[in-house]
Image (tube, rainbow, N blue to C red):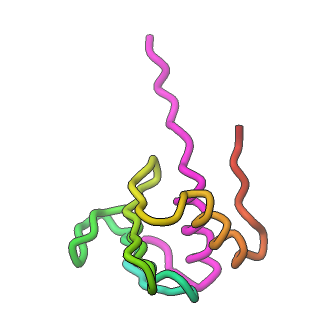
Amino acid sequence: MSDQSTPPVGVLFATIACWAVEQGMPSRSFWEGETDEWNVTINATQEMRDGISPMHIHLQHKTYMAFAVLNARGGAITGPSEDEVIAHFNGLLKEPVEAVA
């Protein structure tokens, strides 16, 4: 029998989701927010909304041609490293998200 366990949620996705909840994002909603560097759009619904797939996060940098498309298991990011984006959002949280080994 194969292992049917659920893979862990990515740290970047979890960090941005925690930040959004701290900003007042309602559960299971389509939400837009921003930091000093990033425009953030989260589709936490089960339907495609404004070109964003269900359960995805889109980031668009305000200055550079950098963006990210993320879901709970991974995604793609251009420009800064994943660690830099995690550090940015962790710096805005009351309690930073940490990777679990």
Q: Which residues are magenta?
A: 1-28
- Residue at 56 percent across and 68 percent down: it is 16
Residue 8 pos. (x, y %): 56, 42
Please name whichever residue, 34 or 66, is drawn nearer the observer in this view of the structure.
Answer: 66
Horizontal relation, residue 52 to residue 21: left or right: left
Residue 49 pos. (x, y %): 25, 74
Q: Quadrant of residue 65?
A: bottom left
Q: In the figure, 25 relative to 10: above or below?
A: below
Is residue 15 within the magenta segment? yes
Horizontal relation, residue 50 to residue 89: left or right: left
Q: Quadrant of residue 48?
A: bottom left
Q: In the figure, 58 relative to 13: above or below?
A: below
Using the rendered image of the protein, determine whether residue 29 is visible from the camera's viewpoint: no
Using the rendered image of the protein, determine whether residue 37 is visible from the camera's viewpoint: yes
- Residue at 31 percent across and 63 percent down: it is 54
Horizontal relation, residue 80 to residue 28: left or right: right
Q: Quadrant of residue 42?
A: bottom left
- Residue at 51 percent across and 37 percent down: it is 7
Position of the C terminus by quadrant: top right
Is residue 62 within the magenta segment? no
Residue 73 pos. (x, y %): 45, 47
- Residue at 45 percent across and 86 percent down: it is 62
Residue 100 pos. (x, y %): 70, 43
